[in-house]
Amino acid sequence: MATTPSGRQTDARDRDSEGRARNARPRDGLGRPLPYGADGVARQPEGVVRTPEQSLAEAQQLLDAGKPFHAHEVFEDAWKTGPPQEQALWRGLAQLAVGLTHSARGNVTGGARLLRRGADAVEEW
């Protein structure tokens, strides 16, 4: 807990306009947090409802641009906003993108594990 100048206790977490905890630190192209005030890569907006075709096209553009972390966020939106019967597919695609992110960051073991998990989920489709 932190204390404000007025003496009020705060949890010192970045919060969005609805009070949900959000990390407002800038991020690099692979989603790694940078110090506050640093120039970062624009983040994907969260909670965007897209058609499946839009989700796939946007995620593919991000993957082609070397931004698997950002593609993961697009897949995560589809997973969380799409029909329940498709959630496992979108979650699997998000795991594939996160696996690519971890691999690009140098976490080969974690990346491989997530790629396998995502591939298993997508293979069921």
Image (tube, rainbow, N blue to C red):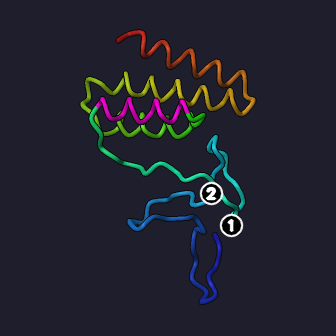
Could you tell me which quadrant the C terminus lies in?
A: top left
| Mark 2 residue crowding within 10 angstroms, few (<14) / some (14–19) / many (20+) | some
Q: Nearer the viewer, residue 40 or 113?
A: 40
What label sits on residue 26 in the rendered view?
A: 2
Q: Is residue 43 left or right of residue 4?
A: left
At horizontal 24% and vertical 31% (from top left) the residue drawn is 83
Which region is colored magenta?
52-64
* Residue 124 forms part of the magenta stretch: no
Q: Secondary structure at mark 1?
A: loop
Amino acid type for the residue under numbered disc 1: Gly
* Residue 57 forms part of the magenta stretch: yes
Q: Which residue is mark 1?
A: 37
Above or below for 7 versus 106: below
At horizontal 34% and vertical 47% (from top left) the residue drawn is 48
Q: Nearer the viewer, residue 62 or 72?
A: 62
Mark closer to the chain start, 1 or 2: 2
